[in-house]
Amino acid sequence: MLRLRFREERLGQTAGSLTFTTLISLVPLITVMLALFTAFPIFSSFQQALEKYFLQSLIPANIARPVLAALTQFAAKANRLGLVGLVVLGVTALMVMLTIDRTLNRIWRVQRPRPFAQRVLVYWAALTLGPLLLGASLTLTSYAITAGQGWVTGLPGGLSSLLSVLELLVLTLAVGGLFHYVPNTHVRWRHALLGGLFVALGFNLAKTLLALYVKQVPTYSTLYGAFATLPIFLIWLYLGWVIVLVGALLAANAPALASRLLYRSEVPGFELDLALECLRELWRSQARGEGGVSALALAKRLCIDPLQLEPVLDSLLALDLLGRLEEEGAQRLVLLHAPENTPAAPLLNALLAQRSSSSLQSLWLRSDWERLSLADLLR
């Protein structure tokens, strides 16, 4: 399922796009963070904790030191920019976050993202408060471990093992929060944290393997010399985004995986086929006297991934073939029209062949689609 979705959503290309966007946005992001830490000297210890965390946890050390030094040097020159330059820096810093927002909403198949102004406000708050909260967490953790060093060293594995576990926990919570809050849909915490744990473990494994490869196979150092840091850093950014996107897929498809629901290949006619299955099942439910079916229950009856079902349900709701009832916090889907008295033409026009297209006029004229009722298709 994950392989099919990764290929159909073209997430390999998306990871490349995010790598490019991240490379452009790194200096503005670090500039905003440095400006925040410079404005409040009391937070200088937070800055040191963040730098140490990124050096030890996220990036192989032989890549992190020169890259972080260069980025800090570039960001330190930002005070020479005028007002227009600072505005451009701010827009560039937000650009990577808006790209992440669009990608995660696509993975969760969200049709309507949050309003643009609301997204900008939320991400600007995350851009300014996020480093402070993360730095405070790392500083307090470091202080607690230092204060209790005598107790920590008595633990199996000692101090390094506890630090590794804490770093894994911090990254899991951070990525889990990203998966929980960014998509404009309800994402359960256990699913978001599952994806976050996958990303945290994937980062640690990829960091170790990449560092080992660079050490054992010095291809880039031989070819590029002192310039080798840049291509290696680009490879690391790409690998990192692939890991994050696969973790998002895992979190998004966790309900389907847990319920053993299937992911179907989206061949031509897939939406119409699935729409007829939904209508047929709701018609049978109505005949049995049931008061509607929830979207998740309908997905289980059809044995299909709920994320695949949601866009089809949105199309049927837009055509007023279905209604969504809300009672006591529960949503139920019901048929709004009797299939025997409902023409099938609007459904065929929306999901199969648009009559407004001049090349399809002959198809509509020579077929009997205008005379078909919805019941004719469902039978």
Image (cartoon, helix red, strand yellow):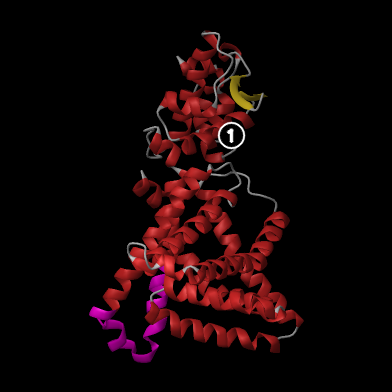
Q: Quadrant of residue 66?
A: bottom left
Specify whether residue 10 is in view: no
Indicate whether residue 227 is drawn in magenta: yes
Indicate whether residue 326 is drawn in magenta: no
Q: Is residue 89 left or right of residue 248?
A: right
For this rendering, which residue is in front, 338 or 310? Answer: 310
For this rendering, which residue is in front, 178 or 90? Answer: 178
Specify whether residue 335 is in view: yes
Q: Among all residues in the image, which is located at the extreme right?
A: 83
For this rendering, which residue is in front, 159 or 133? Answer: 159
Q: Position of residue 341 (x, y in %)?
A: 60, 12
Name the residue: 55% across, 53% down: 177
Q: Position of residue 143 (x, y in %)?
A: 54, 71
Name the residue: 43% across, 41% down: 254
Q: Position of residue 255 (x, y in %)?
A: 45, 37
Q: Among all residues in the image, which is located at the extreme left?
A: 216
Name the residue: 45% across, 14% down: 379
Depicted 40 relative to depicted 224: above or below: above
Instruction: Name the kind of residue labelled 1 in the image.
Output: Asp
Q: Quadrant of residue 303?
A: top left
Which residue is tagged 1?
314
Tag 1, which secondary structure? helix
Dominant secondary structure of the magenta stretch?
helix
Q: Quadrant of residue 318?
A: top right
Give the class, few, some or many, for how many residues have Cα within 10 Å of label 1's Cα (few <14, many ≥20). Answer: few
Where's the N terminus, which quadrant? top left
Magenta highlight range: 215-238
Name the residue: 47% across, 44% down: 191
Q: Among all residues in the image, which is located at the extreme top?
A: 288
Depicted 246 relative to depicted 239: above or below: above
Q: Position of residue 181 (x, y in %)?
A: 59, 50
Q: Is residue 208 left or right of residue 347?
A: left
